[in-house]
Image (tube, rainbow, N blue to C red):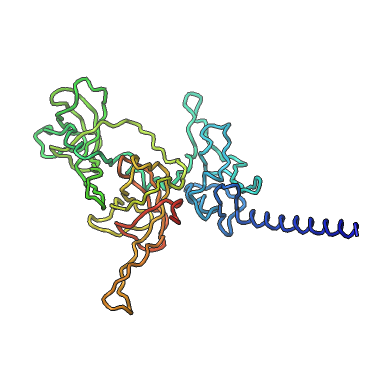
Amino acid sequence: MKKNNTLFAFTVLALLLSITSLSLADSLAEGATSNNETTIKLKPGHPQQYTVQKGDTLWDISGKFLEQPWYWPEIWQANKQIENPNLIYPGDHLTLIYIDGRPYITRDKYGKRTVHLSPKTRIAELDLAIPTIPLDIIAPYLTKNRIVNPHEYNQLPYIVGISDDRLSASTGNTIYVKGIPKGADDKNFGVYRSGTYYRSPKTNKVLGHELIYLGQGNLVKNGSPSSILIEKAKAEIFRKHRVIPITKNTIVDANFLPKASLMKNQASIIGVLTVGIQPGVSMVGSMDVVVIDAGLKDGVEIGDVFNIYKKGDVEDDPIQKGTQIQLPDENSGNLMVFRPFNHLSYALVLDTKTSLRIGDVIKSPLMENE
């Protein structure tokens, strides 16, 4: 009897170990986590290893491994002993590993970083770190156009005259500006015209005033008025246009990490900025730069990812005549914020499942079921 009990106990133990092993294998296959941690869903058919290529973006690479690319910070195993450990370069070799059943991406081989040009010159980067999202698309919106608070535009210094009695200024012309403080340390100024006033779809309150970049120049003489020599003009510059100090050699940070936004409220797409899109167009597509009605004051940060919900149509009830039914909003894509302002942000639409338009709602992926 005792032997039978012992045999039964061992049989039950073996069965439990077998079930546990199968459960662990399933968890590893799905990339599941426990202990109230984020559940990481690996993409079906994901690679075990990947060598970073020129032209890659962090979003693209994350999408090769994850069904939800915004969870990249959860799986990235950075070497904290190197400078800028989150930067990834062409030639880097990435490998999927598991630690305590949790999937991680580690870098087990480094691509070539630098080349010595000469003993007297500084070491220059041979290959720049890959950006989070396509830099060629977002670069004009990182350093050129900007959004200011309502009424701030009218307080900015403005052009009162142009050299040689010209009606407009371009590269090589001097503009005369009223309102630059005497003794100002700023030497480089951008020239802007008034752009769109963006309003809240809910309250109609002005959230921000967009300024359109026209060119820039150097302060030649500070006075009343001050003289600025235009060194670069993107468009014609006229009297009344405003000037704002800008920093030369601004370093564009395009290497932020994507992450699900922590903002709990929903917001909306309220504008499309992509070059080539005609004013008044309301359609939104993949790789379009858009304006959303949420910013720093709402808790929005660089790298925040939101899901985009296409507004549901209103349909006539086929049975109850004269009754209309509001169809539910559908999750139809996502976007990433790359430049937040106080109450507005510039964002890039990354993936779309269908056509979108101004007015569609955005929500954090963390609010998916709320």
Residue 291 image offset from top left, x and y in percent: 31, 49
Between 274 and 11, the one lying in front of the other is 11
Q: Residue at x 32, y 51 (%)?
A: 290
Count of marks, rendered view = 0
Please give left or right for residue 237 compared with residue 311 in the image: left
Between 135 and 22, the one lying in front of the other is 22
Residue 49 image offset from top left, x and y in percent: 61, 50
| Residue 102 vertical placement versus 168 (above, below) | below
Please give left or right for residue 205 compared with residue 79 in the image: left
Please give left or right for residue 25 compared with residue 87 in the image: right
Q: Residue at x 65, y 45 (%)?
A: 99
Between 45 and 74, the one lying in front of the other is 74
Q: Residue at x 16, y 32 (%)?
A: 175
Residue 76 image offset from top left, x and y in percent: 56, 43
Which residue is farthest top?
Answer: 183
Residue 189 image offset from top left, x and y in percent: 24, 31
Which residue is farthest front?
Answer: 1
Question: Residue 329 is drawn in which quadrant?
Answer: bottom left
| Residue 108 vertical placement versus 30 (above, below) | above
Question: Residue 74 is drawn in which quadrant?
Answer: top right
Which residue is farthest left?
Answer: 165
